[in-house]
């Protein structure tokens, strides 16, 4: 039986991971600003704390999974909103590193979140963990977040950074927001639809985190996405087909730029990222094709 600390544990990935670990008879401590929600969202056996100072110094954590971060696409990127996005990622991670630095019982491993947005607008270029970036806000945000987490290496803690793609899940996540217009027959590509979408099934996301926790050879950056990214146009067509609906209503790029300003980059640009490092270590995805992944997700709703 192991003991894990999860930040951002009430989010889509964190809550699913917490439930999986508890069902596997592990102990889970969740850092949350709303501790009363933790048992309901993460499992009734999850231990909730509101700050790192609330954690007993005598607890030895086998791993820390750092997934904290305010939703990036929920509100306009005003200066105030950017400050929240940065504090919830970079700031919390800095607090985590300071907390680990002062503990005698340090965790064996840190798995820390990031996103394929680190690469910025990648066009149609295939992106591996060694690829360069296009400088824009998502890159700067993710880069500072990653660099903060990598300070744990100075404490002799093994660090894995997961650059996550779009997570497909039956409840929550970006797919939840897409389903209503598509079910109404009002779905379609965004802009020209050529921007790539790196996606991952929630089950594979959890499986990959567990793989990185257990694999002592795993270090550094990992793209957490399926080996088969698709364009937005193809994604829209496959989703519409799964729902037996047409996809005839494209969203014009000018409209998104008008209403979303800088944040429109999230929808109008993309990354064709592949999980080269994870596969090189022997990780095997259960869902490598979007059609089967969506079929599984939609059947479980």
Image: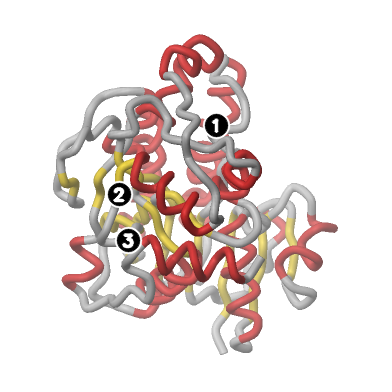
- Name the image quarter holding residue 81: top right
Which numbered disc covers residue 230?
2
- The C terminus is located in which quarter? bottom right
> Mark 3 = which residue?
226
Q: Residue at x 65, y 42 (%)?
A: 184
Q: Residue at x 41, y 40 (%)?
A: 145
Q: Earlier in the sequence, mark 1 or mark 2?
A: 1
In the depicted view, which residue is nearer to us: 154 or 86? 86
Which numbered disc covers residue 276?
none
- Determine whether the residue tagged by mark 2 lies in a helix, strand or loop: strand
Q: In this view, does 118 lie above or below 55?
A: above
User: How many marks do you count on the picture?
Assistant: 3
Q: How far apart are marks 3 and 2 (CA)?
A: 10 Å
10 Å neighbourhood of mark 3: few (<14), some, or many (≥20)? many
Q: Earlier in the sequence, mark 3 or mark 1?
A: 1
- The N terminus is located in which quarter? bottom right
Which label sits in the foreground, 3 or 2? Answer: 2
């Amino acid at each position: 039986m192991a003991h894990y600390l999860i930040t951002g544990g009430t989010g889509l990935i964190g809550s699913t991971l917490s439930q999986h670990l508890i069902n596997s008879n592990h102990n889970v401590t969740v850092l949350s600003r709303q501790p009363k929600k933790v048992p309901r969202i993460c499992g009734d056996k999850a231990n909730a704390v509101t700050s790192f100072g609330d954690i007993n110094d005598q607890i030895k954590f086998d791993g820390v999974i750092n997934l904290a971060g305010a939703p990036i696409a929920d509100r306009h990127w005003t200066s105030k909103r950017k400050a929240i996005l940065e504090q919830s990622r970079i700031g919390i991670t800095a607090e985590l590193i300071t907390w680990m630095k002062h503990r005698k019982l340090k965790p064996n491993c840190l798995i820390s979140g990031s996103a394929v947005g680190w690469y910025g607008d990648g066009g149609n270029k295939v992106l591996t963990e060694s690829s360069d970036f296009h400088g824009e806000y998502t890159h700067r945000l993710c880069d500072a977040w990653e660099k903060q987490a990598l300070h744990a290496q100075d404490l002799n803690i093994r660090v894995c950074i997961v650059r996550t793609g779009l997570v497909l899940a039956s409840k929550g996540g970006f797919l939840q927001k897409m389903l209503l217009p598509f079910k109404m027959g009002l779905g379609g590509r965004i802009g020209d639809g050529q921007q790539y979408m790196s996606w991952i099934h929630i089950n594979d996301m959890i499986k990959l985190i567990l793989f990185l926790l257990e694999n002592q050879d795993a270090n550094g950056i990992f793209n957490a996405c399926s080996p088969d990214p698709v364009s937005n146009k193809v994604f829209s067509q496959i989703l519409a087909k799964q729902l037996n609906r047409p996809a005839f209503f494209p969203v014009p790029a000018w409209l998104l730029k008008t209403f979303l300003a800088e944040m429109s980059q999230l929808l109008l640009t993309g990354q064709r990222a592949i999980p080269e490092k994870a596969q090189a270590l022997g990780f095997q995805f259960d869902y490598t094709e979007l059609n089967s992944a969506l079929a599984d997700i939609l059947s479980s709703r």
